[in-house]
Image (tube, rainbow, N blue to C red):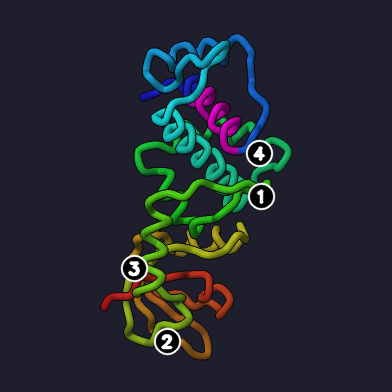
């Protein structure tokens, strides 16, 4: 596992390269970059260190985790916007080993962070595109008796996300439609729930063929 200090240094260089943000030159960052050089993630280019292709891949992943962390903290946990960036800096190092993709799926593959900056796409986003073309549809469009697996939640309202999570509506959860009028009733496990059309539109299901 790469040290957090190295990840943050690669994140900084990635943003310098792709979004023309200012370069950080403090001693801690420089020390991390020198260590990253021994790993082939940066290389000497004249008077300064430049990120390599391998470093760009890792830097992009850190940016993706950071901005997904911001979305999770803001949309689901209702974190204070004043400290959002600092909190995400701590949280980004936890979202490894597939956790970032799970958060991305949970949030419905958001294109931007709360500050409007783009979130780099992941393999789960490409898979969601393919699924959307084929078999994924909103719960409100399911007929009674139809069943599938929750694909993602398409809402930025943290109250709606919390409500759905409380009912067990999470990506990968089996779900079955019981009725679609006058309210949308569905079953998860041994429990049945009724929601209005607005909430049913936000639940996207990978229907069984």
Q: Give the spatial CA distance, label 4 vs label 1.
A: 13 Å
Q: Residue 197 in the image: state x and y as whole percent.
A: 55, 80
Q: Residue 7 in the image: state x and y as whole percent.
A: 48, 26
The residue where tag 1 is placed is: 116
Between circles 3 and 1, the one closer to the viewer is 1
Q: Which residues are magenta?
A: 7-18
Mark nearer the N terminus (3 vs 1): 1
Q: Give the spatial CA distance, label 4 vs label 3.
A: 32 Å
Q: Residue furthest left?
A: 209
Label 3: state its secondary structure: strand
Q: Quadrant of residue 84?
A: top right
Q: Is residue 15 magenta?
A: yes
The residue where tag 2 is placed is: 179
Mark nearer the N terminus (2 vs 3): 3
Q: Residue placed at 35% from the left, 38% from the top?
A: 97
Between circles 4 and 1, the one closer to the viewer is 1
Label 2: state its secondary structure: strand
Q: Magenta region's main secondary structure?
A: helix
Q: Residue furthest right?
A: 82
Label 1: state its secondary structure: loop
Between circles 2 and 3, the one closer to the viewer is 3
């Amino acid at each position: 596992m790469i040290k957090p200090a190295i990840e943050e240094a690669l994140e900084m260089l990635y943003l310098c390269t792709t979004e023309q943000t200012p370069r950080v030159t403090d001693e801690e960052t420089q020390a991390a970059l020198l260590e990253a050089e021994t790993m082939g993630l940066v290389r000497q280019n004249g008077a300064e260190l430049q990120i390599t292709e391998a470093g760009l891949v890792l830097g992009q992943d850190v940016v993706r985790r950071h901005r997904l962390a911001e979305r999770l903290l803001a949309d689901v946990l209702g974190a204070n916007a004043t400290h959002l960036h600092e909190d995400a800096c701590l949280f980004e190092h936890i979202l490894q080993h597939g956790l970032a993709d799970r958060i991305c799926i949970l949030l419905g593959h958001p294109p931007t962070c709360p500050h409007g900056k783009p979130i780099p796409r992941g393999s789960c986003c490409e898979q969601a595109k393919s699924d959307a073309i084929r078999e994924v549809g909103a719960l409100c469009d399911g007929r009674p008796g139809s069943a599938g697996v929750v694909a993602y939640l398409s809402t930025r309202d943290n109250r709606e996300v919390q409500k759905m999570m409380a009912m067990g509506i999470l990506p990968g959860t089996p779900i079955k439609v019981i009725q679609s009028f006058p309210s949308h009733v569905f079953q998860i496990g041994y429990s049945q729930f009724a929601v209005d059309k607005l909430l049913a539109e936000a639940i996207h299901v990978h229907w069984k063929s």
